[in-house]
Image (tube, coloured by chain):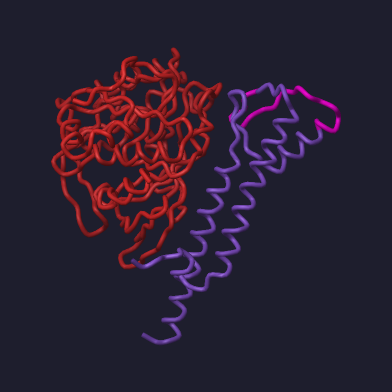
Chain colours: A red, B purple
Amino acid sequence: MVEYPSGFYMPRGYVIYAHNNPSIDYGSMALCNALLIKKHLKENAVALISDKGTINYLENSYSESLLRQAFDRMIVDEQDTTVAANRRFFDTRYSNFTEQYRNLNRPNIYDLTPFEETIMIDADYLMLDNTFDAAWGCVEDFMCNRKTRDLNHKVNNFGFDNRFNEMSIPLYWATAVYFAKTDKSKLIFQLMNFVKENYAYYQYLYRFNHSGYFRNDYALSIAIHIANNFMEYGSISNLPTDHIMFSLEDDEFHRFANGQCYISSEPAPGDFHLHKVISNVHIMNKRALLRNKDEIISYATS
Amino acid sequence: MDDRLQKALEFSKYRIGLFNRKEDLKLKVNNMLVHSYNGGIFRSTHELITFVKLLLDQAHTRVVLVDENGNPIEVTDLQAFFDDILSKYFEATNYYHTEYTNLRAARSVNSIYEFIDG
C-alpha cells in the first residue's frame, strides 16, 4: 500500500468512490477524474474511497508517483455485499452487459471524508472546467442539483420533470454533492443510511420503480425530503452550476483531446449527433470512458 | 436517395450541430460568469453589474447583496467586488464572442466541431 503523508484531515477537497467489478474499472475512472481535478481546479485535494481489491489493482496498474499525484488520501471502506445487486449496463445502443453494482456505501461518507468541506462526485463525472471552485466556503452547508441536461440539451430525460413519478417528490442527483461537516449534513447522510436499510419500505411509500439495486439518488432525495419536514422546497440549494450535464449510456465517447470530449449521441437508431463537450459532464457509458483513459491521463499530467 | 433530400438532410445535421454547439457555449459562458464572494455565489449578469454600479455611484462602499441562492451576503469592499464581476463578465463574453465568430464561419458539421484527423 502506498504510504501517504501523516495528518489525515484537510480543510477542503473532493471525494470519489470507486469499487471495481469484473467488468468495469471504476478505479481507473477515479484516477482520470482526480487528475482532471488537479489540472482544472484551484482547490484540488482528492480522496479515494475504495476497497482493498480495487486499490491493489490500481497499484499494480499505475506507478506510485501517478497515484500520489492523483490522490491525496486513499481510504479503505469494504463494500456492503449483502445488498449488492445486478444491474444492466449499456455500451451504446448496440451492446449491453449485466454486472454487480457495488457503489452502495456512499451514505457513510460523512464519517469517512478527511475534509471539513467535501464535494463528493461520481468517478465518471468528469471535471472539465473550474466551476466548482466557487462552491467552497459557501454559506450553504449542503448543495446538490435537481436539474439535468443531456448532450442534446433535453432537460426532462427521465420523465416526470425529474420526480420519482407524477405524484411524487423531486429527484436530487447524488452525482455531485457539496457538504460541510454540520448537523444538517450529518442528518441527511444518517437518513440516507436509514433509507438504505429500509429500501423496500421506502420504495412502496414513495412509489418509485425498484431497478433491482440500491440507488443513491433515490436515497438522497428521500433523505432530503424527510430532513426538510416532508416539504418540497426550501432547504437545498444548487451547486454553482444549476444542472448536471450528462452523456447517456447510448452515447459513444470517441475521443478526448485538449480537455474536450468528442461524443456522438443517438437519440433514435441511426440518428447520430456530434458533440464537443467543454463543461463538466457525467459519462454514463463507462466502457466508452475507459476506452479514452490513456488520453485523459496523458492530457491531465502534461 | 433523391439529391434534394440528401442535401436537406445534410443541412439538417448541420443545423442541429450548430444548435447544440451554441447551447454548449451558452452553458460554458454561464459557468464562467459565476463569482464566489464571502460565502455567496453570484453571477456577473447585466442586472448585477448595473445594480452594483448604481450603488457605487451613490457612494456606497459596504452593502448587503442577495446571492443566487437567496442568501444575504455582506460585501465589505464594493469597488473590488465590482471590478471582479466586471472582469468575469469581460472574460466570459470575450470567450463567447471568439467562439461564436468561429462557429458562424463554420459551414459543415466537421468544422462546427473542429475535428482533426489523426
Looking at the rendering, the stretch of residues picked out in magenta corresponds to: B55-72
With respect to residue A259, does B68 lie above or below? Answer: above
Residue A6: in magenta span? no
The percent position of residue A35, horizontal first and vertical second, equals: 35, 39
Residue under the image location 64 percent in, 52 percent down = B94
Q: How many marks?
A: 0
With respect to residue A24, does B12 lie above or below? Answer: below
Residue under the image location 30 percent in, 26 percent down = A106
The percent position of residue A18, horizontal first and vertical second, equals: 25, 33
The percent position of residue A122, horizontal first and vertical second, equals: 34, 36
With respect to residue B84, does A198 lie above or below? Answer: above
Q: Is residue A168 at all visible to an observer of this figure?
A: no
Q: Along the line of sight, which residue is nearer the eye, A50 or A221?
A: A50
Residue B69: in magenta span? yes
Q: Is residue A49 at all visible to an observer of this figure?
A: yes
**Residue A198, image quadrant:** top left
Is A78 on the left-hand or right-hand side of A125? Answer: left
Is A210 on the left-hand or right-hand side of B64? Answer: left
Q: Along the line of sight, which residue is nearer the eye, A256 or B1?
A: A256
Residue under the image location 44 percent in, 70 percent down = B13
Q: Along the line of sight, which residue is nearer the eye, B24 or A53?
A: A53
Is A14 on the left-hand or right-hand side of B60? Answer: left
Extreme right residue here? B58
- The quarter of the rendered structure image containing the N terminus of chain A is top left
Is A134 on the left-hand or right-hand side of A101? Answer: right
Q: Along the line of sight, which residue is nearer the eye, A211 or A136?
A: A136
With respect to residue B51, does B111 lie above or below? Answer: below
The percent position of residue A264, horizontal first and vertical second, equals: 36, 60
